[in-house]
Image: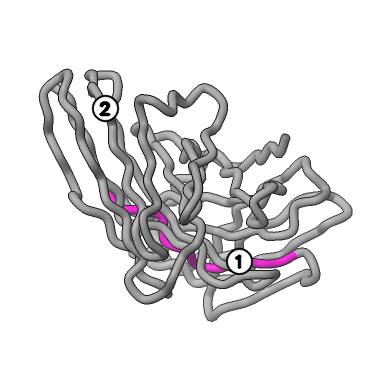
Amino acid sequence: GAVVSQHPSWVICKSGTSVKIECRSLDFQATTMFWYRQFPKQSLMLMATSNEGSKATYEQGVEKDKFLINHASLTLSTLTVTSAHPEDSSFYICSAIRGGGSAYEQYFGPGTRLTVT
Amino acid sequence: GENVEQHPSTLSVQEGDSAVIKCTYSDSASNYFPWYKQELGKGPQLIIDIRSNVGEKKDQRIAVTLNKTAKHFSLHITETQPEDSAVYFCAASSPFSGGYNKLIFGAGTRLAVHP
C-alpha cells in the first residue's frame, strides 16, 4: 500500500505552547489530506480536510484558529496546535488520498501522540 | 449526514475460526466502503475496500460484501490467526464538495484471536 508518514511520532509540550505535526505522502502526490483525532478506545473523528493550495475545510466544532492547517505542497500537510492545553492531548492521525475519480484510496499515517502538561 | 453503525464492539474467536463484522450506513449516496485494521498505538491500515458497483471482493483470507439495497456491508476473516487481533474500523464515504468523499467511521470492533 501507499506510504504516509508523520512527524513527530510523539511529542510532549507545556501548556500554552504550540506544536507542529507534519504529514507526508512518500510515494504519491496528494491534493487532499485529512486530519483526524482519536481518543483512547474511540473511533476516528475528522477534524479537517486539507487541500493543496487552498484553505482547509474544518468540521463543525473544530476551532480553525486553534488547529492551523497548511497544505504547502502535493506531499506535505502540517497541523499546528496553537496554545495547547491538556485537553488537546490526543492521538492525531493524518491521511492522504491516492488516485482520483472513482479509483481513489485513503491511506493513513502512523499517528502522532500529543501530551500537553 | 452519513451515519455508520458497526457491530459487534468486541469479538473473541479461537484461532482458525472465522470472524464477521457488520456495518450499516445511512447515506444512499455513499459509494466507497473501506475497512481498516488498527493495532495499538499505530495508525489505521487499509486492508480491503469495496465500491458500490461491486457486491463482493476477496483478498486471501479477507472478504467484504456489500448490500446496497439494505445499506450494509460486512468484513469476513477466515482462518483467523493471533496476529489478526486488532481493532477493525469500517467506513463509508460521504459526499464532499471538494470532489473526494470524506470517510465516516464506525465505532470499531476489537477482535481478539485466542491461540
Residue B41 spot, x, y in % from top left: 27, 48
What residue do we see at 66% from left, 41% from top? B4
Q: What is the chain identity of the residue bearing mark 1?
A: B
Q: Amino acid at mark 1?
A: Asp
Q: Residue at x 60, y 57 (%)?
A: B20
Instruction: Give coordinates of residue B27: x percent, y percent.
Output: 78, 43
Count residues near mark 1 (Cα–Cα under 10 Å), then give few for <14, some for 14-19, many for 20+.
Answer: many
Question: Does the magenta segment cover residue A61?
Answer: no
Q: Amino acid type of disc 2?
A: Thr
The answer to whether any part of residue B97 appears in the image is: yes
Residue corresponding to mark 1: B49
Q: Secondary structure at mark 1?
A: strand
In the picture provided, is A28 more to the left or to the right than B23?
left
| Residue A95: % across, % down | 43, 55
The residue identified by callout 2 is: A82
- What distance separates the C-alpha of mark 2 from that of mark 1? 36 Å
- Residue closer to the observer: A38 or A104: A104
Left or right of A31? Residue B104 is right
Residue at left 39%, top 37%?
A38
Any magenta on residue B41? yes
Asked if residue B82 can be seen in this view, the reply is no
Q: Which residues are magenta?
A: B40-51
